[in-house]
Image (cartoon, coloured by chain):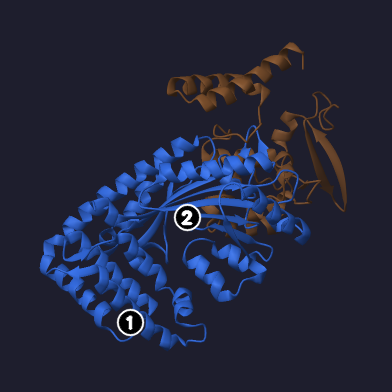
Amino acid sequence: MNVLDNIIVSTRLRLARNIAGLPFPHKLNEMSARKIIDNVQNALAPVDKFSRYDMNNLSAIDGTILQEKHLISLDLLKDCPFGSVLISADENVSVMVNEEDHIREQVILSGLSLDQAYDRVNRIDDVLGKSLNFAFDGRFGYLTSCATNLGTGMRASVMMFLPALTIQKMIDGCINDVGLLNMTVRGVYGEGSDAEGYLYQVSNQRSLGMKETDIIDSVNGAINHIVDAELKARQLLMRNEDRLKDEICRAWGIVTNAYRLSTEEAMRYLALVRLGQHYGYIDVSDLNVFQKLITDCQPANMQKSGGYSMSADERDVLRARHIATALTSFCKKTV
Amino acid sequence: MKCTNCGLHEATTEVMVRRNNHVEKMFLCGECAKNFRPDMGFDSFDMLNKLINGSPMGLLSSFGNLFDTHASRTLICPDCKTTSEEFIKSGFVGCSKCYKVFEPLVVQSVKKLQQSDRHVGKTPYGYFDETDEDRLKAELKDAVDNGDYGKIVELSEKLKKIVNNKREGN
């Protein structure tokens, strides 16, 4: 496990596509929308086995679970009655249909894997492109419902864990720096210094006038810059090592002993435990399992694992028990 | 067909123009289309200003310099009926055709947002642009340098089509 594993959580790469000759989703009638879903499902058949979830047949909790796993967007869940998603068995690929664009092909991989993610999504795009006629223009590239996605239709995002920059209120400066590199930084759960769990999504702004590989290079450049800044900020935190150790050990104490834990508390203390892994105060055998634990602790995922009829209080009790059991099975305090 | 505005050049862009209470179709040449401005009353301008800061990536702010209170025309897409006002307010178009209808607006905004108005990335399966011969040749050279045989075959086929089309005088 290297230093980057602690800072970089996952990579997401998506391509926006539309079918030529049809209105974009917000102007589409139900019959055409359903036909597109069927056509995309058929076109995907040679790629892998995909599970299909139509938004109009999905319960609120099941939909939120998909959203908490980042397999669908909140927009698809809330605002797209004729929307659907096709998800691969390994849950690394999701293809949203009739969201902002007819098709949003997306690959999510753990760690910093922009090249691998592009390679996979590009292969899926090639397969879809052979049976679906994509809307394309020689000048503007792939045509999308919003001009901000024109060109490649590509958004390359990296989820980063940036506690030291956030705690020391250096995150806004860092966001400005990478803004100059045409990158956007958003809190995964909340914005700016209020980002819960210190998790941020860094992604490209430009999708037109650059090749896909150049976009990936530019995102990689921005990621390197942020990683350097976070590592320096983590060194600064060490100036008061006793306090740092105390905060992390207290967090460990709470997540392994609390009787009840709200989502916000769980996010806050688990983030400190993850930071403890960086300093060697906590031994974590698998950071991917750690990240899955954070997803499992989100309200809808928790609700499903404990039974749909649970109250919020019961859910908090279950969350505390689940975290304590899981953490002690693959993590250990070493100080 | 000649441009219905200047009558000098060939028309390349079809636009719907709203004049008072009726809509009429116009066919514009590239130059007139470039200078074409949508109708935006004061109410719309106020709304635009309110939206500028909250728009995705400042998209709407890039339309500020297109604003012309003296113009009295609104572009309307003939296919999906999206208007230039809707596009300016939301940043969204309704269909592929909108990009032709609103091309002057789109070009100016994407130049600011994306620092470019020309796609250089991937093209869909089977697509080739006859005017893109040089780009294809450059891509073919890259593919040869990288030993990407699949790409070499694909690009060679595209170039062959262009050459054949030229021979046939298309």
- Between the residue at mark 1 and the residue at mark 2, the CA separation in whole angstroms equals 28 Å
> Helix, strand, or loop for circle 1?
helix
Q: In which quarter of the image is residue B102?
A: top right
* Residue underneath mark 1: A321
Q: Residue at x 62, y 71 (%)?
A: A58
Residue B55 is situated, as x and y percent measured from the top left of the image, at 56, 56
Q: Quadrant of the C terminus of chain B?
A: top right
Decide if residue B72 is on the left or right side of residue A62: right
Q: In this view, does A58 lie above or below B116?
A: below
Residue A121 is situated, as x and y percent measured from the top left of the image, at 51, 45
What is the chain identity of the residue bearing mark 1?
A
Residue A298 is situated, as x and y percent measured from the top left of the image, at 43, 73
* Residue underneath mark 2: A92
Decide if residue B105 is on the left or right side of residue B138: right
Give the class, few, some or many, for how many residues have Cα within 10 Å of label 1's Cα (few <14, many ≥20): some
Decide if residue B64 is on the left or right side of residue A215: right
Q: Quadrant of the N terminus of chain B?
A: top right
Answer with mark 1 or mark 2, whichever residue precedes in sequence.
Answer: 2
Q: Can residue A181 be seen in this view?
A: no
Amino acid at circle 2: Asn
Residue A324 is situated, as x and y percent measured from the top left of the image, at 28, 78
Decide if residue A302 is on the left or right side of residue B154: left
The tint of chain B in the picture is: brown
